[in-house]
Image: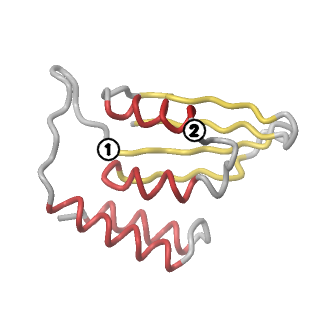
Amino acid sequence: MASAEERMQILRMIEEGKISAAEGAELLRALDKSGRGAKSEPLKGSSSPRWFRVRVTDTGTGRNKVNVNIPMGLVNVGIKMGAKFAPEIEGTEYENIMEAIRSGQQGKIMDIFDEEDGERVEIFVE
């Protein structure tokens, strides 16, 4: 079952306008489903990551445009939603993200500079 902290994070994202109510409902449903399944074991000697974070920064001003934390149980749904913010992340880059998550990598797993739009997209597993 989903923790109260994960549910509150989703509700805060809705309240702040980061996601729509429909997207929030989808995340909550996915969170409930992921809580019922068997949990995979973390790599030996490591703790399992709890959050998948995407941060989009305006390179001109240095201010955050997007800073979203998603519970790891919702990564598949979250990546699909994140594709709306960064459509250039597809194909090989998407596979690189998923492989880093499956292998248990933690910390910053992707750092992309979009000079055309003046944005920096960073993806973390924490």
Compare marks 1 and 2 and give the one earlier in the sequence: 1
Q: Label 1 belongs to which residue?
A: 50
Mark 1 neighbour density, 10 Å: few (under 14) some (14–19) many (20 or more): some
Q: For the point 78% across and 39% down, which residue is it?
A: 62
* Front position in the image: 126 or 82: 82
Instruction: Give the label on residue 91, or none.
Output: 2
Q: Give me the C-alpha separation between circle 1 and circle 2.
A: 25 Å
Q: In the image, what residue type sits under mark 1?
A: Arg
| Looking at the image, residue 17 lies above or below residue 36 | below
| Looking at the image, residue 117 lies above or below residue 65 | above
Q: In the image, what residue type sits under mark 2?
A: Gly
Q: For the point 43% across and 44% down, which residue is it?
A: 52
- Name the outermost residue toward the front: 91
Q: Quadrant of residue 50?
A: top left
Q: Describe the element under mark 1 as helix, strand or loop.
A: loop
Q: Describe the element under mark 2 as helix, strand or loop.
A: loop
Residue 61 appears left or right of 74: right
